Image (spheres, helix red, strand yellow):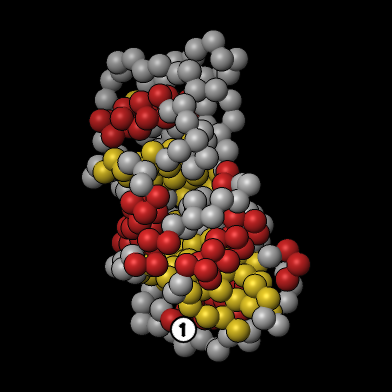
Amino acid sequence: MVAGEAVTVHEAGLVRSGGRGSALRERPPRRLPWRHEPDHRTIPSPVDVTAAPPTAPDAEPRLAGDAAELRLATGNAAALWTALAETRRHPVTRRPGFLAVRGDDRAGLRVLLRTPEPTADDLVEIAALVREWTEGPVTVEDPFGGADLTGSGLTPRNLPVMIRPPAPVPAPSLRVTPVDDPERLATVERVVVSGFPLSRLQPYRPGEAFPAALLDRPGVRFLLAEVDGVPAGACLTVRAEVAGLYWMTTLPEHRSRGVGRALLHAVLAELAGSPVTLTASRAGRPLYDSLGFRPVGRATWWS
């Protein structure tokens, strides 16, 4: 959610490697049917989607009691991607088991699994979306880590999903203010695109990542951190059933000066009374641990 202090989610500049020439064929239920086409990749066929995907050696065990919180975090991610798609005017496919956003050649295709047990029909439709996509990068985000897309030509990456219950938090040590006008939103957008970075949206184009219409979107909020009056960091939050934190960024020239901690203190103060979820990078994990976030699952991002 990685060049900032955290990675959330939800658009970490992941770029799919290799071509997409796979074709579907009929297989028994619960199997994702890929086959090799002459694009010089090695693609096993078929792939059993009932097995868990590869996980990092330090993967944390998933606890049964975390399932409800993981679903809440996933619902928040769906709210984020719906807001982005609708304000960017990108088509959205909504199914009970997944959400898919079909962006342009820079934003690419984004698929979010919404359940730990997608149906065979869901998996076939996701396979078709990935196979037929020709407009740029592809990311399939599986918060539950249960679908194996090894045969799709995508590469997995594991990231912990974390949640923090409401609790007191210190005041920010730096100036952190909410953003409510297009000019300052453009500043936030520049900070995130260049500092996170969102490499697939570079070079920077005003309004591409964060259209001004997001300022009118219920539950969506931007925060900007400054050091001596100069923009130093930024982030985005979304309120749904719980709150979610995304793209928390510190510009390189301001790192190791407490900007990330100040941003997080401001976020938690503004969202007081609500649990807060995020997806953490390795670099951001110590900060989140120190402020009471705990893991509820380990997402697999395929790109």
Q: Quadrant of residue 92?
A: top left
- For the residue pair 300 and 55, the one nearer the viewer reads as 300
Residue 271 appears in the picture as rendered: yes
- The single residue placed furthest to the top in the displayed view is 38
User: In the image, is 167 to the left or to the right of 273?
Assistant: right
The quarter in which the N terminus is drawn is bottom right
- For the residue pair 159 and 99, the one nearer the viewer reads as 99
Residue 35 vertical placement versus 5 (above, below): above
The residue drawn where x is 54% and y is 10% is 38
User: In the image, is 79 to the left or to the right of 297?
Assistant: left
Residue 188: image location, x then y, percent? 55, 66
The residue drawn where x is 60% and y is 60% is 190
- For the residue pair 258 and 284, the one nearer the viewer reads as 258
- The residue identified by callout 1 is 269
The residue drawn where x is 31% and y is 30% is 125
Residue 211 vertical placement versus 142 (above, below): below
Q: Amino acid at mark 1?
A: Ala
The residue drawn where x is 23% and y is 45% is 96
Secondary structure of residue under mark 1: helix
User: In the image, is 95 to the left or to the right of 174?
Assistant: left
Q: Residues within 10 Å of mark 1 (few under 14, many from 20)?
A: some
Residue 54 vertical placement versus 232 (above, below): above
Figure disc tally: 1
Residue 267: image location, x then y, percent? 49, 77
Residue 101: image location, x then y, percent? 37, 42
Residue 144 appears in the picture as rendered: no
Residue 215: image location, x then y, percent? 39, 67
